[in-house]
């Protein structure tokens, strides 16, 4: 029960070091951006910011796509917007499932009424390109939907070859890059991706609540063939597309493109504060330099992994495909994983992640993302985890982890 006096307490959340698989601590500049003054949605300054956000995210996504914008909602809203806008009932979609978020793509596509075929990959591995090509030839999907970095398993699915295959077979290629973007290479145009969605709360270093997306011209055309402008704002020059109307109003990307486009056709009220956050995340990424940010994530990820190994812990999954920004580590024998996590939080204010599905209770997931892809975060986390594990008499080698991680920095 919430006690009544607590309702009027000043909001004062504790300072935590968020070293899980997301959300993470936002860059301080992002907090500043969010606190800036609100302006009207058609204020020329606001529409100017919207244009800037589009240009900035073209840089983040490494694309020339005109249709680059934000969907207002968490990363899942970006996924849902793409799938509901591209897929009509009965359309075929192929999904390589390498973890929890692959299942999510299937689930959303099914709700949309699409016919889903999966390529099921053991957790901890990625999907070979040949398997994708084989399945495309047999199944002839309209869309291939993938996850790049699946945080549930910490694996990073290679996309370049799959992109070439989709291109060759005329299949639209969508990817959920929420967890991987800004911490691992992602080259939207070079890899022939037609639609990519993301979120801020991983390597981009912001809060959750905004989903940057980008759509190729080809993908935008497919979506615009389903265009159906709302009655209250429709004008004579608006033509209704020949294909079936998109089943969601909020996630109707045909209308959202018109809101972000020169017509500025009214749809939702853009989430101003979140747009400020998204803008700042992109600006930080591009200012530091994409390659440098990704290298910083790799350095932090490698240092953390080396530290965990030096402690005598075993890492989960095929390390050749590990994401730079999150590592899965087996919970040592005879300790209660959740109890250790709770003590880390209480004694050190550090949060690390649990895991889902077949990995639940077996591994922890530790992230080094965005603002937290830094030496001090890595070293502090290793030292703290080691202290708690030693306290619980886990079979670890003390005194090695921090030194092993420091090798990556000094
Ligand atoms: C973390 C994550 C998300 C997050 O979705 P939200 O709606 O922002 O919670 C989506 N996809 C992947 C692959 C993720 O790792």
Image: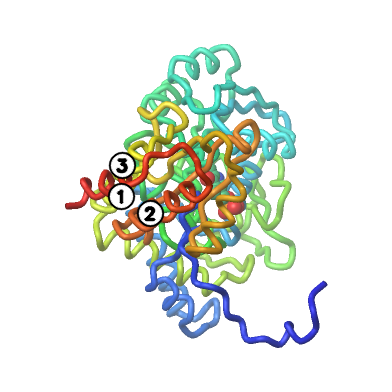
Q: How many numbered circles does the render carry?
A: 3
Q: Position of residue 272 (x, y in %)?
A: 53, 74
Q: Position of residue 4 (x, y in %)?
A: 80, 84
How far apart, in angstroms, are the residues tagged by discs 3 and 2? 16 Å
With respect to residue 46, does 230 lie above or below? above
Residue 75 visible, this angle: no
State how the image is colored: rainbow
Q: Is mark 2 within 8 Å of ligand 1?
A: no
- Nearer to me, 335 or 376: 335
The answer to which image quadrant residue 52 occupies is bottom left
Q: Earlier in the sequence, mark 2 or mark 1?
A: 2
Q: Position of residue 282 (x, y in %)?
A: 37, 61
Disc 3 versus disc 2: nearer the observer:
2
Residue topped by disc 3: 302
Residue topped by disc 2: 383
Q: Secondary structure at mark 2?
A: helix
The quadrant of the rendering that contains the N terminus is bottom right
With respect to residue 249, does 272 lie above or below? below
Residue topped by disc 1: 402
- Nearer to me, 199 or 143: 199
Disc 1 versus disc 3: nearer the observer:
1
Looking at the image, do the residues carrying marks 2 and 1 touch, with CB atoms under 8 Å apart?
Answer: yes
Q: As drawn, is 93 to the left or to the right of 352?
A: right
Looking at the image, do the residues carrying marks 1 and 3 touch, with CB atoms under 8 Å apart?
Answer: no
Q: Secondary structure at mark 1?
A: helix
Q: Secondary structure at mark 3?
A: helix
Q: As drawn, is 357 to the left or to the right of 132?
A: right
Q: Residues within 10 Å of mark 1 (few under 14, many from 20)?
A: many
Q: Residue at x 44, y 15 (%)?
A: 130
């Amino acid at each position: 029960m919430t006690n009544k006096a607590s309702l009027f307490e000043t909001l004062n959340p504790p300072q935590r070091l968020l070293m899980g698989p997301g959300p993470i601590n936002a860059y301080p500049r992002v907090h500043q951006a969010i606190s800036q003054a609100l302006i009207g949605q058609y204020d020329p300054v606001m529409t100017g910011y919207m244009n800037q956000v589009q240009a900035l995210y073209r840089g983040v996504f490494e694309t020339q796509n005109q249709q680059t914008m934000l969907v207002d909602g968490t990363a899942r809203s970006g996924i849902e917007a793409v799938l509901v806008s591209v897929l009509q009932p009965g359309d075929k979609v192929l999904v390589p499932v390498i973890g929890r978020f692959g299942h999510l793509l299937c689930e959303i596509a099914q709700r949309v009424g699409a016919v889903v075929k999966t390529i099921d990959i053991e957790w901890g591995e990625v999907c070979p390109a040949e398997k994708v090509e084989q399945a495309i030839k047999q199944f002839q999907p309209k869309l291939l939907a993938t996850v790049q970095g699946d945080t549930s398993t910490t694996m990073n699915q290679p996309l370049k070859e799959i992109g070439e295959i989709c291109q060759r077979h005329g299949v639209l290629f969508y990817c959920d890059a929420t967890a991987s973007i800004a911490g691992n290479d992602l080259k939207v145009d070079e890899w022939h991706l037609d639609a990519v969605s993301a979120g801020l709360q991983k390597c981009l270093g912001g809060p959750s609540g905004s989903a940057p997306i980008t759509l190729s011209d080809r993908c935008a055309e497919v979506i615009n063939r389903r265009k159906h402008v709302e009655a209250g704002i429709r004008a004579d020059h608006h033509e209704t597309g020949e294909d079936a109307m998109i089943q969601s109003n909020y996630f109707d990307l045909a209308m959202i493109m018109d809101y972000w486009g020169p017509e500025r056709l009214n749809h939702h009220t853009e989430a101003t504060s979140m747009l400020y956050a998204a803008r700042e995340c992109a600006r930080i990424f591009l200012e530091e330099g994409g390659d440098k940010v990704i290298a910083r994530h790799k350095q932090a990820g490698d240092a953390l992994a080396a530290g965990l190994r030096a402690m005598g812990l075993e890492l989960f999954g095929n390390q050749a495909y590990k994401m730079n920004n999150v590592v899965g580590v087996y919970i040592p024998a005879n300790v209660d994983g959740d109890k250790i996590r709770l003590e880390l939080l209480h004694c050190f204010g550090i949060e690390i992640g649990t895991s889902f599905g077949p990995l639940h209770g077996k591994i922890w997931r530790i992230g080094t993302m965005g603002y937290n892809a830094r030496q001090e975060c890595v070293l502090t986390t290793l030292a703290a985890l080691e202290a708690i594990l030693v306290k619980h008499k886990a079979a670890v080698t003390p005194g090695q982890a921090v030194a092993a991680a420091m090798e990556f920095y000094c």
